[in-house]
Amino acid sequence: MSGDLFDNAVATAQIARHGFRCAWCGTWHTLSIPDPHRRFCGDTCRSRAWEKDHPRVPAPKPRKEDGEPSRGEKILARLRVGPATGIELLQAGGGIRYGARILELRRAGHAIETETGLDWPVYRLVREP
């Protein structure tokens, strides 16, 4: 019986020694179960540490120093001529991601219809903002 009490006392002392200091706020925390990988006391401290190490930087806007129109402008110029398939927009200089440029034009207020069911989608400029 005394052996059980001694074992429990030793186990309690070992558990009390297990702990960690939060890497963000510096508070000391004890753990009932040892966890060597724990560094933060909670989600808030973990998020704040991540944001400190990884600051949000806005994406740089592309510079057009040479005066060449952007890919979106090239696609818009092609759609002003008339309906165009995806391959025609690709050849007009819209790039491989011409669908993303179409989405940007739609978000800018251009009404562009898409006909599907063919080999290539056909895009048609209905109206401009």
Image (spheres, helix red, strand yellow):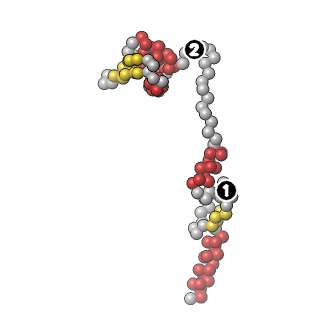
Residue drawn 36% across and 23% down?
A: 114
**Viewer-closest of 51 and 94:** 51
Q: Where on the picture, by quarter, is residue 23?
A: bottom right
Estimate the x, y position of residue 77 in percent, counting from the top left: 47, 13
| Left or right of 87 in this view: 18 | right
Q: Which element carries disc 1, helix, strand or loop?
A: loop
**Image quadrant where one finds the N terminus:** bottom right
Residue 41: x and y in percent read: 61, 59
How far across and how far down the image is residue 95, in percent? 49, 21
Left or right of 76: which side holds 16? right
**Residue picked out by circle 2:** 68
> Quick one: SS at disc 2?
loop
Is 127 or 72 nearer to us in this picture? Answer: 127
Quarter of image, res 54: top right
User: What residue appears at the point 38 percent right and 15 percent down from the top-left corner?
Assistant: 83
Disc 1 marks which residue? Answer: 25
Around disc 2, counting alpha carbons within 10 Å, would you say few (fewer than 14), some (14 to 19), or many (20 or more)? few
Q: Residue furthest bottom?
A: 1
**What type is the residue that disc 2 sits on?**
Glu
